[in-house]
Amino acid sequence: MPNTTDKNLDSDYILERLERIGGLGHWRYEFESGWLFWSRGVYEIHGLDPSQYKPDLESAVKCYVPEDREHVQACVERAIKNGENYTFECRIQHPDNTVRTVVSQGEIELDDDGKKVAIFGTINDITELREYETRFQLAALGSTSIMWDWDIVNDEVYWTGRILELLGYNNAEEMPSNSLTFFKNLVHPDDHLKLKNAFGDHFAHRAPFHIEIRLQKNDGNYAWFSARAHAHWDSEGRATRISGSLTDVHDLKMMETKLKRSNEDLNQFASIAAHDLQQPLRAISGFLSLLKEKYHEELDDSAQTYIDHAVTSAENMSELVKDLLEYSRIETEEIHYKLCDTEELVADITRSMEHIFKSEKFTINAENLPQIVCDPLKIQRVFYNLIENAIKYRGNDDPIITVIAQQQDNADWLFKIKDNGIGIDKSKQEDVFKMFTRLHKKEDYEGTGVGLAICKKVIDLHLGQIWIESKAGQGTTFAFIIPQPLNQQF
């Protein structure tokens, strides 16, 4: 057993150590003698040396900044007169003019006869806490958001930030103070379930908390807000509090809705227009062919040439309309993910190309291509367009096309389609995926300028990337990445 006089067990030593660690001090003022006692912690909080300063009530009050002295004096006098305990927060000024924020508490001591004999009190330096709170308040006010904190255990909600500007409430006291009034008075009824599920997923699985909900403003109207938050869990894994922000995204949401509606209308128009244009174009081409066939003997060479040009133009227009129709459908159709064998897919395209380009001599090399998760029909269109592009823009030699794939460290697949064609000048490579972009004269190479735009749209819809590697006269490589986050589901 250790000696009870050991300083590690001495009560005075323990008290002094606790005060130093906690930024605390205690004091006692006797009414009859006017004697004021300060512990070492009180001296340290006041920035005073015990050997050079002997405290008394009057000088102790003068340690506070001038603006706070009257309040301190009133609290002490009221306690002495009425026997009331007190708590106040004020600022102490050190001899070097450093200002510290403190909380002082006092209670009246009574003798056996119930007579007031002294005040015993504590003082706590909370300067760092108040500075942190001030920085937080300034950060909240300087942001474009409302900050909130939910004490889950006691079901108390606290607010700060741009409450007036964003919701129309004058101060935090007007805001819901618990979760029930928060849901009842602030959250749009249609968003209750979404918000509850977000809280549940975050508390139970620690999933990221980020949702968009509608909140009722002070004028009764609802506005869209982006809510982000993060909880604190205790040692047993239970969420005890959660803090977050609310950012006004109403204008952005309205613009997004308007833009979506506009895009839907535009895509619908493009689809209908492209579909309805096919029939008159076929009719024009058909009637011109009949005209040439029936009146062949009566038409001179110039008329025959004009009719041929008109038929060709109608056919080109029909191809362009078909490509536009396909592009608009890609935009509106959903992605249907399936497990796709890309080697088999490229083999099908090769057979198709051999049928279409009967007079062309070309080689397509593809080996060890993987199975991936994608929309097979859309990805097939990407391979088809890129391989057709390689055959079309051939050089002096017969086209040799190589299709390879490489799995990345994150499990995504990188595909490359290489050719030995005419290549693309570096200055023009950024434009190849734009709609209607043609790098060559129409007389030299056929095409609508939509095929590569379709490829980019498909890859974008798969959340991938597509780019080009090429030099003029040295062939072209089209590369694209298909992300594979869904592989585990198949």
Image (tube, rainbow, N blue to C red):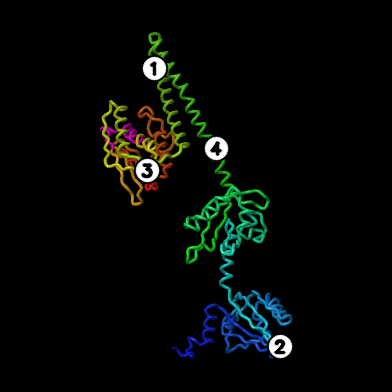
Residues at discs 2 and 3 in contact (Cβ within 8 Å): no
Amino acid type at circle 4 is Ser
Amino acid type at circle 1 is Thr
Farthest residue toward the right?
81
Residues at discs 2 and 4 in contact (Cβ within 8 Å): no
Amino acid type at circle 2 is Asp
Which residue bears the numbered disc 2?
A: 113
Q: Which disc, if any, is residue 373?
A: 3
Q: Secondary structure at mark 4?
A: helix
Image point 56% across, 57% down: which residue? 245
Residue at mark 3 to residue at mark 1: CA–CA distance: 50 Å
Mark 4, other Cα within 10 Å: few <14 / some 14–19 / many ≥20:
few
Residue at mark 4 to residue at mark 1: CA–CA distance: 43 Å
- Work out whether mark 4 precedes mark 1 in sequence or the reverse, and give the earlier one: 4
- Work out whether mark 3 precedes mark 4 in sequence or the reverse, and give the earlier one: 4
212, above or below 377, in the image: below
Residues at discs 3 and 4 in contact (Cβ within 8 Å): no
Q: Secondary structure at mark 3?
A: strand
121, above or below 476, in the image: below
207, above or below 356, in the image: below
Give the extent of the magenta segment.
385-401
Residue 320 lies, in percent from the top left, at 43, 29
- Work out whether mark 2 precedes mark 3 in sequence or the reverse, and give the earlier one: 2
- Work out whether mark 2 precedes mark 1 in sequence or the reverse, and give the earlier one: 2
Mark 1, other Cα within 10 Å: few <14 / some 14–19 / many ≥20:
few
Question: Quarter of the image containing the N terminus?
Answer: bottom left
Residues at discs 2 and 1 in contact (Cβ within 8 Å): no
Which residue bears the numbered disc 1?
A: 305
- Given residues 117 and 408, the one toward you in this image is 117
Which residue bears the numbered disc 4?
A: 262
Residue at mark 2 to residue at mark 3: CA–CA distance: 88 Å
Q: Nearer the viewer, mark 2 or mark 3?
A: 2
